[in-house]
Image (cartoon, grey):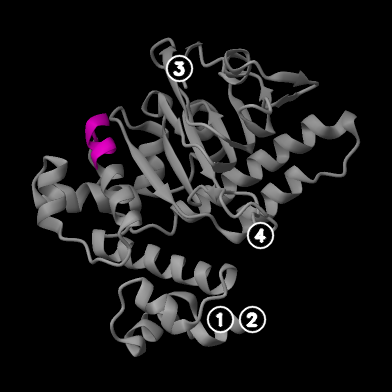
Amino acid sequence: MKIEVVDKNGSGILQKFADAIGARVRGRFIDIPQHLGEGYMTGFTWGNDLRMMIRNYYLKEEIVLERKNEIPEGQENVIFFLSSIFDSSNQKQETIIAEQPNVFIAMQSVSSVMAMPQNTFFRSITISASREYLKQHFGELNHSIVSSILSSKDTFAYEIGISPAMITTASEMLYQSVPESLENHYNKLKCEELLCHIFALLLQREETPSSGIHIKDIKAIYAIKYHLQSNLDKAPEINSLAKEAGMSEPKLRKLFKQTFGKGVFEYYQYMRIQEAARLLKEKHLSVSEVGYQLGFTNLSHFSRVFEQQIGLKPKKYSAL
């Protein structure tokens, strides 16, 4: 299903999306129709400077949401998209997959097309903040990436991981225990807390010169990311990936590290070990099964790489 909505003046798309799919409105909650899936969306608005949308649902069929922005020049907001932010350890449906956990940061126009695959859980929070609001709260931070987010006239896109602190804050938001009269204020505080955790992680990124990135290059870089995720048992070939992306190897390496904070192989190895940890914990596979499934021919090497990233050997980690 393809849905097109127009976002005027940064007014948001929650209600427009609900109307398009025929969702039932229940107070501030919008319930997903049963023929499309299960769960809900909800949102908060605090003036023109700060908005938040929570998605906690799964879909039976794919939905592609295409947003056309009609926003006055100079008023475009920064989007912080926190995917897979809510704990999914109690997920029962084996056929339902979860989004990859990360925080995607970009100007609002960059996130104009949102693909929502079928049979996928969406446990995400989207924060939209004006640059004036962000400068007021984070303008004193001295970091090149922060400066780019707050002031750059060029298009940018950054991705960072989801920290345990973010998961805790999001959980407190989802299962809040405050009176309804305090709900709006409570969620604003939690929204600002999430932004603090995001900027704390950004400050840990290596400071490297950033250049503007065209939207088509962002799409190409993310196509490479998804290729790596889908082929964790095969080491990436930079030359082939660069040709597929239609860019030189140096440009690919530069834009990939600028976006993700890691080189292509380093990022591939990071995702590989994260998947290994998931298979050990959630699927209860043996160390050898996980190692061979992810393309490690030497289990001692797998154990060393796993310990470097996770802090424990895989056997000890799986026993926790």
Q: Which secondary structure lies at badge 1?
A: helix
Q: Residues within 10 Å of mark 1 (few under 14, many from 20)?
A: some
Badge 3 vs badge 4, beta-carbon distance below 8 Å = no
Where are the magenta residues, as a range? 213-220
The label number, if any, that marks residue 75 in the structure image = 3
Spatial CA span between label 2 and label 3 = 49 Å
Number of numbered tags placed on the structure image:
4
Spatial CA span between label 2 and label 1 = 6 Å
115 drawn magenta: no
Spatial CA span between label 3 and label 1 = 48 Å
Q: Residues within 10 Å of mark 4 (few under 14, many from 20)?
A: few
Left or right of 181 on screen, residue 315: left
Query: Which residue corresponds to mark 4?
Result: 89
The kind of secondary structure the magenta stretch mainly shows is helix
Query: Which residue corresponds to mark 2?
Result: 320
Badge 2 vs badge 4, beta-carbon distance below 8 Å = no
- Residue 188 coordinates in the image, percent (x, y): 71, 35
Specify which label sits upstream in the sequence, 2 or 4: 4
Q: Which secondary structure lies at badge 2?
A: loop
Which mark is nearer the camera, 3 or 1?
1
Specify which label sits upstream in the sequence, 4 or 1: 4
Left or right of 136 on screen, residue 69: left
Query: Which residue corresponds to mark 1?
Result: 317
Give the residue type that dot 4 points to. Answer: Ser
Specify which label sits upstream in the sequence, 3 or 4: 3
The label number, if any, that marks residue 165 in the structure image = none
Name the image quarter holding the C terminus: bottom right
